[in-house]
Amino acid sequence: MRTSARAVLVLLLGSLLAACASTSGERTTTWPDDVGRTIPAPTQPLPPPPRQPIPITPGTPGAGDPSLAMIPPPKSLPVYPKTADEISSQAVLSLMKQARTARAAGQYDQASGALERAQRIEPRNYFVWSALGRVYLDKKLYDNAESVAQKSNSLARGNVYAQLENWKVIAEARQAQGDAVGALQAQAKVDELQRNLAGG
Amino acid sequence: MAPPVRHNRPRVPRQFWYGLAAVVLVLGSIGLVAFSFYLVALDKDIRTRFAGVRWALPAQVFAAPLELYSGLNLDTGDLKHELERLGYRSSTALEGPGTFSLGKDRADIFIRAFHFWDGPRAESKISVKLAADGIAEVTDVGSGEPRDIVRMDPMLIGSIYPQQQGEDRVLVKLEEVPDLLREGLLAVEDKDFYDHFGISIRGVLRASFVNLRAGHTVQGASTVTQQLVRNFFLTLDRTWTRKFNEMFMSILLERHYSKNDILEAYFNEIYLGQDGNRAIHGFGLASWFYFNKPIGELRDHEVALLVGVVKGASYYNPRRNPVRAKARRDLVLRVFKERGLIDDAEMQSAIERPLSLAGSKQGGVERYPAFVDMVKRQLRGQYKDSDLTDEGLRIFTTLDPRAQEALERNISQGLAEIEKTKKLPAGTLESAGVVTSVGGGDILGVVGGRDVRYSGFNRALDSRRSIGSLAKPFVYLTALEQGDRYNLHTILEDEPIQLKLPTKQIWAPMNYDRKLHGPQPLYMALAQSYNLPTVRLGLEVGEKAVATTLKQAGYTSDPPLLPSMFLGAVDVAPVEVAQMFGTIAAGGFQSPLSSIREVTTKEGEPLNRYPIRVKQTLPEGPVYLITWAMTQVMRLGTGRSVYGVVPDELTLAGKSGTTDDLRDSWFSGFSGDRVAVIWVGRDDYKPMGLTGSTGALYIWSRLIKDLKVKSLDLIPPPDVEEQLADSITGLRADEGCQSRVLIPYLRGYAPQTWAPCAHAAESQPMQWLREIFQ
């Protein structure tokens, strides 16, 4: 009956181990504000892995939860670039400036033209994409404005400053297209990001 | 007493004379009236033709301008080549617009004025400082101030003219015509231009005298006005009626229009050459056609050649009859000197110069027929044909001459080299290629066939061929979207499959090497392009889901929903393949490919802009995973030979494609900033014995190297996490595992179970036990 004895042992040990293992599987994140939080469902996008500057998203799981008030505020703001100046070449900055001037004068074609030139020089510059979204909004190309802002969000890899501007564009684009619910959702993102920034 | 003799002849009655006079008068009046009608008709003809739209102006097609800025990866050789392609002339000092002087690590450029779509840009002098890694600084020559970014003038790459008539021209104003050209032309063609009234009696007498003495025609008597009328309204047959018409039309033209109007019309109308079925009219275009530069930059010997060609564009064709053309040019130079337009030294130095023609036999323009063909197709939906051929529209395209040139060169050379090394009959292979930007949807270069100058069948757009294994990334991507079922290390079986098709046939696909390789991690099955695991995976996710992915990537047709689609039994044109891979390259954001940026009127008023269009059509996380897998294709799979050509640090993603019996050889892939697709095959669909890796990849690798692409930046999106995997079990690994690989997973789906080899597993001694219960 060695086999059956072993099977019992296996069962016993196994159930024990399985219980232990499940806790080890519930890995906690290392971010100070997220202590004890489990890994969320994959549908909920999370900030990037630690090779990027670590962002702080205190509001994400139930921002209105009073228990969150117990968590001490983060010590410092994430080290994301705040403006294009920090990640762009002189050529791109010059084009972005041209675009701002043109936009201020209501010359939206000129503005988008300059930004598209900048995009060709630095295709991954999310501040350029972000500014482009804003100008497409001016030009009433709402669908495109939203998509371009999403593209910027994607490239921003968690940069809250770029995301804040992008979600504003998305909210306005949706509002202009009569998508009230979508606009509200986007506005909620704006509010959340603003709270995060204010919290820092 | 005899009556006078005259009495013998009957006396003509007086009435007769009156009658005759009346008849003559009537006939004369009728003739006069008829002649008046004739003149009035001619007059009307002249006035309507001359005053209205004088010329149908073909649309001009421009390449994208080169932007010069600090940080651009461009060396001295590239810059020189770039400037020469634009028709800029090298000289020791800047002599005027369109000249440059090149030092060891510095280039001074006198940039031409140009009317861009967003406004005119004045000419300017800049200095470009070059370092080892490209442009270090751009400054203004006058002030020494730095310039952040400077746009060069874009290259004119073609025009859109009607297929039948094929007249092409670039309009010039009389004030743009250099003095030497204006005065020189009159010295040679019409000395009395400012004195005669359309026809020159003196000219006729002089010509008759000269011709009589010579015994044959050496000098024409036609004035510039007559020549214009002939070019403008009449055919070239030498009949008296035509001469008659020409004479009166010339006189009428002179009555209505000033000498300068007529001369300007002449400069734009006169026929000066032929380029296939395109007729080169006017000095404006001729200057580009023969010398690749604007008329204002012509030098003495070039002016003389153009003036010489007026006499007979075919007989004195400088490309075909260079000796004859040079003799004519030198004769013209002597006339210039006789008339005091140039001095003796200038004449001598001009005579010593070669013809200095630009470009190949075809001429300076119409360089990129496959690209211009694509531009035309894109425009056709939006503009009437007559708008394109008549209105002088200016079309600013996305063509990057550097990318285009690299594509052309590598296809031409590559095919010849492949044929040689594979011992294939020379000239049997055909090819097509597309290069696009990542993210913006710009088509940067297109080649439609081996003969890159041939404007016929455009394989890049029209040749839809099976894509073979290029379909695999889309099968795997479909699976990776289901994070709960698949990750990059999911083990796939490499076992034989037999399927009964709806046609009752049995389909039994095999691996390319006809071997079985045992269980494979998903990414490895893609990297090695194994067929059996792919079909297995495809059947699990289903044909419909894969078809959806293909369409989301940018495929526009309906693929046949058969298992063979997993191995690429889907016909796609190279440009569409570029679209599909471009969507992956841009993280799932699709930008419809476009070859046009802006269209303006001939005056520069913007008509149409084509903004960057973007739409997320594929989920970011799974796209990141498949991109990572495609980098493994390059690092250790069927694309690895690329690293014999490009440096190791360059991260690239790609996929080879081979179809049944080696009929099609594909390679498609991307860097951080460029997507490139190469197809190699035969037009008769015969097998040629090349796989994607031996045919298309050979060209692709060299193309990527020449494009100086930016490395792919693998930064995982928020919903992707990386974790070490044991390369045998695919389970979670740490330093304890000999063979481990860092694999990206959709967040939350990375395996939490430690591999047996992991140190962490030792703290869980009964790991294997737990596994039993999972």
Image (tube, coloured by chain):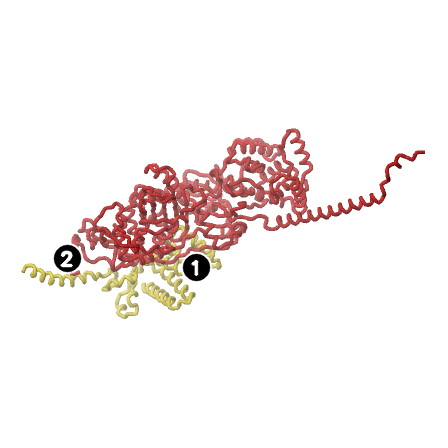
Chain colours: A yellow, B red
What amino acid is found at the position of numbered circle 2 in the picture? Answer: Gln
Marks 2 and 1 close (CB-CB < 8 Å): no
| B754 displayed left or right of A88 | left
Task: Look at 66% across and 34% down and name the residue there.
Answer: B207
Q: Position of residue A122 (x, y in %)?
A: 38, 51
Which chain is mark 1 on?
Answer: A
Residue B227, visible in the rendered structure: yes
In this rendering, the answer to whether B314 lies above or below A58 is: above
Question: Callout 1: 10 Å neighbours few (<14), some, many (20+)?
Answer: many
Image side of residue B698 versus residue B311, left or right: left
Is disc 1 placed on a helix, strand or loop? helix
Q: Nearer the viewer, mark 2 or mark 1?
A: 2
View extreme (right): residue: B1
Mark 1 sits on what residue?
A: A136
Question: At label 1, which amino acid type do we have?
Answer: Tyr
Which residue is under mark 2?
B767
Viewer-side residue, B447 vs A141: B447
- Give x and y (percent) for residue B269: 58, 44
Looking at the picture, how far across and down is residue B553, in whole percent?
A: 35, 55
**Label 2 chain ID:** B
Image quadrant for the C terminus of chain B? bottom left
**SS assignment at label 2:** helix
Residue B96 shows up from this direction: no
- Say if A48 sits above or below B692 in the image: below
